[in-house]
């Protein structure tokens, strides 16, 4: 069976990674972006952002002429068989979802479909509230093409579960495919395309209607965040019980096959471009339906609270923080990225500033520039760990970068004025660090 030709609207990390990975397995792919500056860059084999493993795949597929990027959505549709929509769905000021990119691009696709003779499948991969694919994308396709869904046009929704920093790996090795289908033909066309891609490594697949697939994405992220907030709640509870270590507790329950050990790392809470945005959007949308989600509210509240909590722990350890020099190790929302969106470091720094702490210095191996943009002059920025720790009176470790894991108690003692350390990500051996430093770790406070 011939491989279908693919177009992908949107060259963000989901769109460009999917485009590159598909092209690397022999699919002909045309990707589109509205960011003119990115077109020549990508067509020359360079990604406009850093994503582990992407550069190599992209260079190869550009060299082999398997991928091209353009701003012309209609041309892309007219020359392909399946179009994926992977455009942004940002959060508005009132926490609701902004669907304007989906709206614009689906109209463009519809206009092209008016001129197309053969069957064409349109698949939404952008995270959007249930109903968006059918009622916004589907309606635009019908209106602009004057054709009906089902016969000439297929419609599907396939949520993505890619992690930033691992999205190339995740695209090659997904743990499942979720396909929301308008009708059987749409679902079959999409499943067949992925069968040609994965061949004998085809992952488990679940096919369902479009709206259920749309909600899978929100429920998935909501559940992951619930696990994290659950671990954080037990961490805060554990801190009141001598000798209990929340890590052991989470390991213990994670071994229950019904639970699973992942996403139980307690710390200063979750960040990133998706978790907060998706939970806020679905909560707000549910409220418009008259449904008040108590779980989602609690998960978000607990997450906000972790930033306050770590500052409380610092005060409990060294007393009033005003006029003390405080170091922040790690600013990005997770290691391996310079992404500062919803980074816990921002919440921690805001909390410190609220308590009138002004002498704060931060260090991040990758995110110095983006942190300067996100945090501004609320803190100073160090160029090295040594500079960040120099004369410091308390260090809050916020992001679990590998280079912080290599630090020993002696490193902290050598540089800091007083070696007070709070391990906000549980990267250190508790007993070793507790013996040598004035030490606290989230989810384990020995009151003895
Ligand atoms: C997340 C999901 O993991 C992906 O499946 C999903 O596709 C993506 O959002 C999305 O919706 O686009 P990502 O935002 O890249 O991916 O980040 P994660 O690696 O999941 O980490 C998110 C945050 O949770 C980080 O701040 C991390 O430090 C925190 N976290 C994670 C914890 O605090 N504890 C844990 O046990 C795990």
Image (cartoon, grey):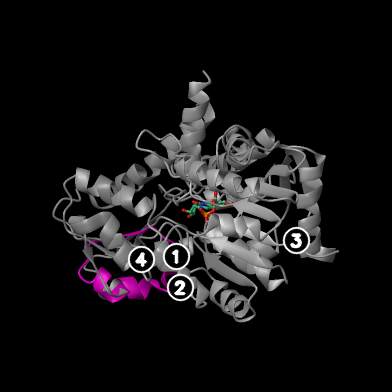
**Is residue 282 left or right of 197 when viewed as pictured?**
left
- The Cα–Cα distance between marks 4 and 3, rounded to whole angstroms, is 40 Å
- The mark that comes first in sequence, 2 or 3, is 3
Tell me the magenta residue range: 385-412
Real-space Cα separation, disc 4 to disc 2, in angstroms = 26 Å
Depth order, front residue of 291/70? 70
Could you tell whether 20 is left or right of 408 in the image?
right
User: Residue tagged by mark 4?
Assistant: 367
Q: Does residue 237 sit above or below 426 in this rendering?
A: above
- In the picture as drawn, the residue positioned furthest to the left comes out as 323
Residue 370 percent across, percent down from the top left: 32, 62
Q: Is mark 2 within 8 Å of ligand 1?
A: no
Name the element at disc 2.
helix
Examine the image and state in which quarter residue 54 appears: bottom right
Q: Residue at x 27, y 51 (%)?
A: 349
Name the N-terminal-most of marks 4 and 3: 3
Residue identified by numbered label 1: 337
Q: What residue is shown with label 2?
A: 40
Query: Mark 2 near mark 1, Cβ–Cβ under 8 Å?
Result: no
Q: Calculate the distance from the C-alpha at mark 4 to the C-alpha at mark 1.
A: 7 Å
Circle nearer the N terminus (4, 1): 1
Callout 4: 10 Å neighbours few (<14), some, many (20+)? many
Q: Earlier in the sequence, mark 2 or mark 1?
A: 2
Residue hosting label 3: 4
Q: Which mark is residue 246?
A: none
Mark 1 and mark 4 in contact (Cβ < 8 Å)? yes
Q: Nearer the viewer, residue 137 or 202?
A: 137
Residue ID at (68%, 59%):
80
Provide the secondary structure element on which disc 1 rests. loop
Residue 411 in the magenta stretch? The answer is yes
């Amino acid at each position: 069976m011939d491989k279908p030709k693919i177009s992908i609207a949107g060259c963000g990390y989901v769109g460009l990674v999917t485009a590159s990975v598909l092209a690397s397995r022999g699919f002909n792919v045309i990707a589109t972006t509205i960011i003119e500056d990115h077109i020549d860059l990508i067509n020359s084999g360079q990604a406009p952002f850093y994503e582990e493993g992407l550069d190599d795949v992209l260079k190869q597929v550009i060299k082999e002429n398997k991928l091209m990027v353009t701003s012309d959505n209609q041309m892309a549709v007219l020359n392909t068989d399946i179009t994926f929509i992977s455009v942004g769905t940002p959060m508005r000021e009132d926490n609701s979802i902004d669907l304007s990119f989906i709206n614009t691009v689906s109209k463009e696709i519809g206009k092209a479909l008016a001129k197309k003779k053969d069957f064409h499948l349109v698949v939404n991969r952008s995270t959007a509230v249930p109903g968006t694919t059918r009622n916004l994308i589907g309606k635009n396709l019908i209106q602009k093409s004057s054709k009906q869904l089902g016969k000439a046009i297929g419609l599907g929704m396939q949520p993505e579960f890619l992690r930033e920093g691992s999205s190339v790996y995740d695209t090659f090795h997904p743990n499942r495919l979720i396909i929301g289908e308008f009708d059987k033909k749409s679902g079959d066309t999409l499943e067949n395309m992925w069968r040609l891609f994965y061949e004998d490594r085809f992952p488990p697949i679940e096919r369902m209607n479009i709206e259920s697939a749309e909600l899978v994405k929100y429920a998935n992220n909501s559940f992951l965040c619930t696990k994290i907030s659950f671990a954080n709640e037990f961490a805060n509870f554990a801190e009141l019980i001598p000798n209990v270590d929340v890590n052991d507790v989470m390991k213990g329950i994670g071994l229950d096959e019904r639970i699973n050990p992942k996403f139980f790392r307690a710390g200063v809470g979750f960040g990133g471009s998706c978790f907060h945005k998706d939970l806020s959007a679905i909560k707000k949308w549910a409220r418009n339906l008259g449904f008040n989600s108590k779980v989602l509210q609690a998960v978000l509240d607990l997450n906000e609270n972790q930033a306050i909590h770590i500052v409380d722990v610092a005060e409990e350890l060294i007393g009033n923080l005003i006029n003390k020099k405080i170091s922040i190790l790690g600013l990005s929302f997770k290691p391996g990225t310079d992404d500062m969106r919803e980074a816990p470091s921002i919440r921690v720094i805001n909390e410190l500033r609220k308590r009138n702490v002004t002498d704060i210095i931060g260090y991040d191996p990758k995110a110095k520039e983006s942190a300067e943009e996100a945090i501004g002059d609320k803190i100073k920025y160090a160029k090295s760990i040594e500079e960040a720790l120099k004369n410091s009176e308390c260090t809050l470790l916020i992001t679990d970068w590998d280079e912080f894991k290599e630090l020993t108690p002696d490193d902290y003692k050598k540089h800091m004025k007083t070696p007070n350390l709070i391990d906000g990500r549980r990267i250190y051996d508790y007993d070793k660090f507790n013996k040598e430093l004035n030490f606290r770790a989230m989810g384990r406070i020995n009151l003895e």
